[in-house]
Amino acid sequence: MKNLIFLFLMIVQFSACYSQEKFEEFTSSFKPLDLPLVNILDLTSRDTLNGKLTNDIIIRNQKEKPQYVDLSRNFKTIKQYYGLYPEDVDDYLKDIKNQNNEWEEKRFFFYPKILPIGDVNLNEDYVSLIIKVIAYETTFYDLWNFTREGKALSVVCLFWGMRDAGPKDEKVTFTIVDSKITKEGLIKWHENADGLETFRTYKLNEDGYFQIIEEEQKGEMEF
């Protein structure tokens, strides 16, 4: 019985060390970013991340979903602007002119991009990473906060934009969420949901969760 317990503890310890090693390898792709960050959409990277590996590390292999703290200091599981990152190639049809100057449909392929934007120092006890995703019709930036061991605690969508041309052009034509990060590490967050505007200020609290410390709404949904 003692041997079985010892073997189980060794397996658990090996698994934890392996996961932390994978996380440290993952974070090595993120370069330090200096605050403040004013124009999130201008942040880019030449490096790319594997979609499946990214999902495995920050979503699938996590025991709990990320949370945030609302204005009433209640913990809430993050549901909006959260989900698996794209892993597969998308195909679409486009009308083009052939050699006979006639219109015909041709199949094209869109390869989503996941970019390691950078490492933001919001608290020395944690690891805060910004990830950019160029999906089929949307472009968005997420700010994740992890423990040093790789446990995903919290995430805030910093930017969410739509592209009229979808897979044909990476130019963002309509912005739904935009943010700024001040020199002090405060996240000034703005959402325009069909006319209902929400203004929030997030701060990373001592427990490693993004906490809403200010919130205001204006207008109303038009649809």
Image (tube, rainbow, N blue to C red):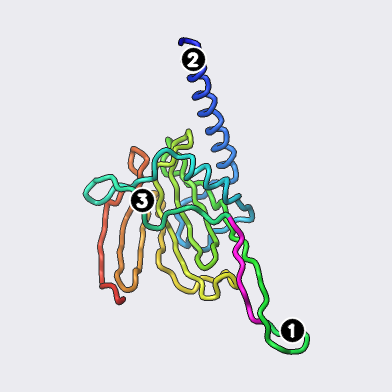
User: Which disc, if any, is residue 98?
Assistant: 1
Q: Residue at x 43, y 41 (%)?
A: 152
Q: Callout 1: helix, strand or loop?
A: loop
Point out the stretch of residues depicted in magenta: 88-95
Magenta segment's dominant SS is strand
Instruction: Tell me the crowding category of disc 1: few under 14, some 14 to 19, or many 20 or more residues within 10 angstroms, Cα based.
Output: few
Q: Nearer the viewer, residue 18 or 200?
A: 18
Instruction: Give the residue at mark 2.
Output: 4
- Whichever of labels 2 and 1 marks the residue nearer the N terminus, that label is 2
Q: Nearer the viewer, residue 145 or 16?
A: 16
Q: Amino acid at mark 2?
A: Leu
The residue sitting at the right extreme is 99
Instruction: Give the residue at mark 3.
Output: 78
Q: Position of residue 160 (x, y in %)?
A: 44, 63
- Whichever of labels 3 and 2 marks the residue nearer the N terminus, that label is 2
Whether label 3 touches label 1, CB < 8 Å: no
Q: Amino acid at mark 3?
A: Ile
Q: Amino acid at mark 1?
A: Asn
Q: CA distance from mark 3 to mark 1?
A: 48 Å
The residue sitting at the left extreme is 72
Q: Position of residue 36 (x, y in %)?
A: 45, 54
Residue 140 visible within the image: yes
Q: Callout 3: helix, strand or loop?
A: loop
Q: Callout 2: helix, strand or loop?
A: helix
Quick check: 108 left or right of 74?
right
Whether label 3 touches label 2, CB < 8 Å: no
Instruction: Tell me the crowding category of disc 2: few under 14, some 14 to 19, or many 20 or more residues within 10 angstroms, Cα based.
Output: few
Q: State yes or no: residue 89 in magenta.
A: yes
